[in-house]
C-alpha cells in the first residue's frame, strides 16, 4: 500500500450538517417543522437549530444558527 502524501495525512473535514429536520409548510414533502420551528403534528414542540435550515447556507453555520434562534424565539414570546 503506498504511503499517504503529507497533505492527505493532514487533511480533515469540519462537519456543518444542516437540514435533517428542514423547515417547510408541507409535512407530506418530508419537512419537519413549520415556519416558526414548531414540529408538524405537535402543539408544543419546537426545533430551532441548524437542523431546520431548508438549504445549506453559503457560509459557516454557527452565526446563521444564532440569528435563526434569536428570530424564531421572538415569534414565540
Ligand atoms: C469541528 C467543527 C468546527 C466548526 N467550526 C465552525 C466555524 O468556525 N464557524 C462556524 O460558523 N461554524 C462552525 N462549525 C459549525 C457550528 O459549530 C454548527 O453549525 C453549530 O454549532 C450548530 O448548532 P446547533 O445548535 O444546530 O447544534 P449543536 O451546536 O451541535 O448543538 C446540539 C446540542 O444538542 C445536544 N444533544 C444532542 N443530542 C441530544 C439529546 N438526545 N438530548 C439532549 N441534548 C442533545 C448536543 O450535546 C449539543 O449540545 C463547526 C463545526 C464543527 C464540528
Image (cartoon, rainbow, N blue to C red):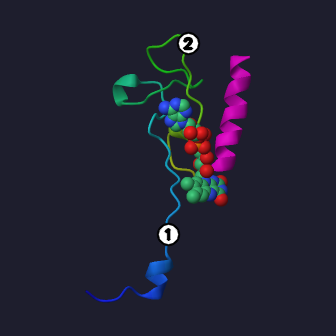
Q: Residue at x 49, y 26 (%)?
A: 33
Eyeballing the image, is 55 above or below 29? below
Residue 10 in sight in this render: yes
**Residue 60 seen in render:** no
Span colored in magenta = 58-77
In the rendered view of the protein, which quadrant contains the N terminus?
Answer: bottom left
Between disc 2 and disc 1, the foreground one is 1
Callout 1: helix, strand or loop?
loop
Q: Main SS of the magenta segment?
A: helix
Q: Which residue is mark 1?
A: 12
Image coordinates for residue 54, horizontal then vertical, percent: 50, 39
Q: Quadrant of ligand 1?
A: top right
30 relative to 2, above or below: above
34 with respect to 59 (left or right): left
Q: Quadrant of residue 31?
A: top left
Residue at 29% of width from left, 89% of height from top?
Answer: 2
* Cβ–Cβ under 8 Å for marks 2 and 1: no
Q: Residue at x 54, y 21 (%)?
A: 38
Q: Pick out the residue farthest to the left.
A: 1
Q: Position of residue 48 (x, y in %)?
A: 59, 31
Tell me if residue 14 is in the magenta stretch. no
Please provide percent x and percent y for residue 45: 54, 18
Earlier along the polypeptide chain: callout 2 or callout 1?
Answer: 1
Q: Which residue is mark 2?
A: 44
Amino acid at each position: 500500500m503506498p504511503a499517504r502524501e503529507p497533505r492527505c495525512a493532514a487533511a480533515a473535514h469540519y462537519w456543518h450538517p444542516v437540514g435533517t429536520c428542514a423547515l417547510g409548510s408541507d409535512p407530506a414533502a418530508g419537512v419537519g417543522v413549520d415556519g416558526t420551528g414548531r414540529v408538524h403534528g405537535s402543539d408544543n414542540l419546537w426545533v430551532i437549530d441548524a437542523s431546520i435550515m431548508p438549504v445549506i447556507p453559503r457560509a459557516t453555520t454557527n452565526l446563521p444558527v444564532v440569528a435563526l434562534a434569536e428570530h424564531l424565539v421572538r415569534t414565540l414570546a
